[in-house]
Each structure stands twice: as structure tokens, then as C-alpha cells.
Image: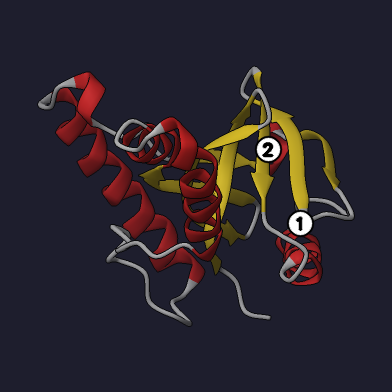
Amino acid sequence: MTLPVRIRNVHYYRIAGHYMFAGDLFVARGSLYFFPEVDLEEQREKVSGHVSHELALLVLAITWLAQRAGSYWSRTEFWQDGMPHEKFQTEAAAHIDKLKWEKLNTAPSATLPLPTHVRADEISGIRLTPRGVLSFSAQSDTHDFNIGLRRRKQLRNVLWEAGLGRV
């Protein structure tokens, strides 16, 4: 498989059993990047706040299924399949800088968090569960990415090829 690789609709940042964001996970040589695209918690709150109590469970189940299917427009317009590693790193860094600048000029409550970029030398305790959850410690935090069963083997192989560890 040629690096870098993009895996879409990855759920990230688990709090109390719920993932907060969905987005694109990029695995590059010696690095992981996560670009959040959707605030899942905000979606759940919007949906559950506009229905009666009797229908709330059904609506939340439908919302969960829609979030798992993952239909969103990616803001990582710089990405192209088969792009060289060096070009990807340059484009990703420029995109992150652009998002940082935009965040400075936007109301904090109305924005997604900035993308996450983690280098191989920052990662410790990496593991991939049988259910397809990638977990590791880096940058003074624990990172949990729900890749899913279907893409688990692909991620395992890509992590090995990228030099991020054998999971």
C-alpha cells in the first residue's frame, strides 16, 4: 500500500463511551494526522432536542446509524490519492496553519477542534482492539480512534508500513 493513506469517517475522542468527532485519519510515513469534520455530540443534541420523549430513543438510534455511515463533505481538499509523501506533509501543514488562522477569527464555540498531528516518536502504548479501536498515548493525552471492524486489517498493515508500530 502506498503512503500516505486516508481513512474516512473515523470517530475520535471518546468521552463517557461516546465519540465526539468524526473525520479523516491520515497515516503517513512516521506520522498520524486526524482532521475533524463533524461534531457528533452537536448532532446528537440537535436531534434529541426537537423530538418528543417517546420518540427520542428511536431518533437517537437513527442518528447513531447515520453517524456510522458518515456522510460529510471533507475539508481536506488538498488530498489526492497517490500523492507523494513530501507533498502531503507540506499540504497538510499548510492546511493546519490555515485552520489555526480561521480559528483565531471565529467564535470558539462554533468551531471544531484543530487537527491532530502525532509523530511516531511521540506515540507510546499503541494498540488496536479486535473491534477496530486504535488507542495510544501521545502529547499528554490518550487518543482513541474507532476505525471499525471492516477497516481494522487495512489500518494494521498501514501502521506497520508507516513505521508506527506493530499492532
- Name the residue rendered at 27%, 66% in the picture: 77
Query: x, y (%) of residue 76?
Result: 32, 60
Residue on which disc 1 sits? 163
- Local crowd at mark 2 within 10 Å, few (<14), some, or many (≥20)? some
- Name the residue rendered at 76%, 48% in the picture: 133
Looking at numbered disc 1 in the image, what kind of residue is underneath it?
Gly
Looking at numbered disc 2 in the image, what kind of residue is underneath it?
Asp
Q: Which of 13 and 101 is in front in this view?
A: 13
Alpha carbon distance from label 1 to label 2? 19 Å
- Name the residue rendered at 37%, 54% in the picture: 92
Is tag 1's residue or tag 2's residue first in the polypeptide sequence? 2
Query: x, y (%) of residue 86?
Result: 45, 64
- Name the residue rendered at 52%, 65% in the picture: 69
Q: Marks 1 and 2: which is nearer the front?
A: 2
Q: In which quarter of the image is residue 68?
A: bottom right
Q: State the colouring used for the structure image.
A: secondary structure
- Local crowd at mark 1 within 10 Å, few (<14), some, or many (≥20)? some
Q: Nearer the viewer, residue 33 or 109?
A: 109
Residue farthest to the left?
105
Query: Could you tell me how many numbered marks the image carries?
Result: 2
Q: Is mark 1 on a helix, strand or loop?
A: loop
Q: Are marks 1 and 2 in contact (CB under 8 Å)?
A: no
Q: Is mark 2 on a helix, strand or loop?
A: strand
Q: Which mark is residue 144?
A: 2
Residue 46 in the figure: left or right of residue 120:
left
Q: In which quarter of the image is residue 153?
A: bottom right
